[in-house]
Image (tube, grey):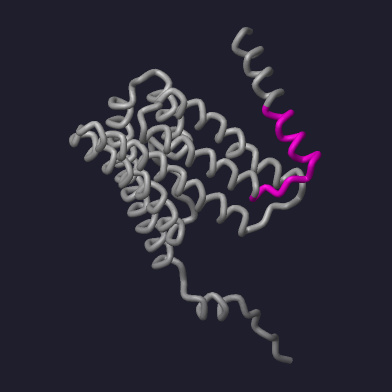
Amino acid sequence: MITRKIGDVCWYAYDAVIRSFVKIRINPNILSFTGFAINLVAAYLFAYGYFRWAGVTIILGGVFDLTDGPTARRTRRVTPFGGFFDSVLDRYSDLFLLTGLLVYYGRVNRFMYVVVVALAMIGSVMTSYTRARAENLIPSCKVGFLERPERVVLIIIGALFDRMAPVLWVIVALSNLTVIHRVIHTYREARRIEAEAREAPPAEERSRNSVTPVAQS
């Protein structure tokens, strides 16, 4: 009961923010860019060791990141470019946040975690790339343990509770496992599609079989 009440309150607040954006007819692309700009501030805070403030800033940026899509749908401004623009800014946001951590660990001479952050960056990029590339070959590749929302939540937890080091290890492990999972999934699906294509009769044969013979008198 309490969980449901909390969920209702959160949903009401979320919907109220969306309705306010719809009311002022703000361009959804501006919301996407605003979320990106706020994440740049969070990256700066990470670089100078203000982890808790960075976590709060990421949450603020998430308000814009989570409302651009619903605002676009409610104002009927959904466009292919809008989705592309949002996706590009999301990738930049991820990489700038991790770059801020990279700078921080470099400043405090923790070389091991410079490497860990670099591996997290590789996993972050490859998680997105494998899905994008796979979906040129198969209908969908949404499998995996760790996508962007989960990564962002983990970074927020690490920042707010001063547990960034273990969080980074989790991101490295799960993001790269996600890449492996997607490679295996794409391999299996591609093989299945190839097998179905080989078993299907050629198009010319299907067209010949579909022609109805004309009765002669």
Residue lying at 65% horizontally and 79% vertically, measured from the top left = 212
Q: Nearer the viewer, residue 48 or 20?
A: 48
Q: Main SS type for the magenta part?
A: helix
Residue at x 33%, y 34% (from the top left corner): 171
Task: Say which quarter of the image contains residue 46.
Answer: top left
Q: Is residue 172 left or right of residue 50?
A: left
Residue 22 magenta-drawn?
Answer: yes
Relative image position of residue 40 (x, y in whole percent): 48, 41
Q: How many dots with numbers?
A: 0
> Seen from this angle, which residue lies furthest bottom?
217
Quadrant housing residue 23:
top right
**Residue positioned 40% across, 30% down in the render:** 155
> What range is drawn magenta here?
14-29
**Does residue 167 appear to the left or right of 14 in the view shown?**
left
Residue placed most toward the observer, 189 or 212: 189
Q: Residue furthest top?
A: 1
Horizontal and vertical percent for residue 175? 34, 39
Q: Position of residue 147 (x, y in %)?
A: 43, 39
Q: Position of residue 26 (x, y in %)?
A: 73, 45
Q: Which residue, as the protein is rendered here, is positioned at the far right?
A: 23
In this rendering, position of residue 105 left or right of residue 59: left
Residue 207 within the segment the image draws in magenta: no
Quadrant location of the C terminus in the rendered image = bottom right
- Which quadrant is the N terminus positioned in? top right
Q: Is residue 191 above or below residue 105?
A: below
Q: Residue at x 43, y 42 (%)?
A: 94
> Is 103 rendered above or below residue 30?
above
* Relative to 107, residue 129 above or below: below
Quadrant in the picture for residue 84? bottom right
Q: Is residue 14 left or right of residue 35?
A: right
